[in-house]
Amino acid sequence: MDLPVLFVLNTIPSDKFSIIHFKDLRHKKDSPAHFHVLVPIKEKSFLCLCIITKQFFTMKNLYADEEEALNSLVHLETGSFKFLNAPQGSVINCNSAELLTREQLESHIDKKIGVQIKAFEDSFTEDLKFKIKNAVMDSPLVKGFIKNMIA
């Protein structure tokens, strides 16, 4: 059964790690759906998202001249999560952290595909949670007001 997008988003706690999967309408029309890590924040009316991509080398080249930004890419080995199966692994781009209300996020989600919750906090190792939080906090590209909301 397909649940309304906002209903699904309202079930996600903002103060816990999770991973969701959706197609972002802000991306090119032929772009695939992507996974996003939700980073815990203090404010319950917002969600903090970082995109997960399998284009590690593209991201590495993008930030090649910015060592701090390069260090805010968190590499995930194949098998870190059963649904991430790129042979070279995936990367969480913590430089892309954005803060959205659930309603704002809903407006970016392709309703034909919807949104799926793929993982909750208990699927994350303590080490991974530490790396993600630090990568967001250390990124020179993440705005200060977002960093101040990280739980």
Image (cartoon, helix red, strand yellow):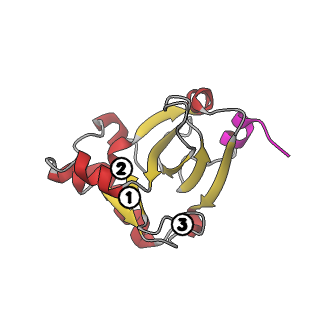
Q: Is residue 86 magenta?
A: no
Identity of the residue drawn at 56% across and 55% down: 18
For disc 2, the marked residue is 94
Residue closer to the observer: 88 or 73 = 88
Residue toward you, 130 or 58: 58
The disc label shown at residue 132, or none: 1
Query: Magenta includes 4?
Result: yes
| Residue 42 visible within the image | no
In the image, which is nearer the foreground, mark 1 or mark 3? 3
Q: Secondary structure at mark 3?
A: loop
Q: Magenta segment range?
A: 1-9
* Left-right relation of 93 to 72: right
Q: Which residue is mark 3?
A: 85
Amino acid tagged 1? Ile
Q: Where is residue 69 drawn, in percent x and y?
A: 23, 49
Distance between mark 1 and mark 2 Cα atoms: 7 Å
Residue 48, compared with residue 128, is above or below; it is above
**Residue type indicated by callout 2:** Cys
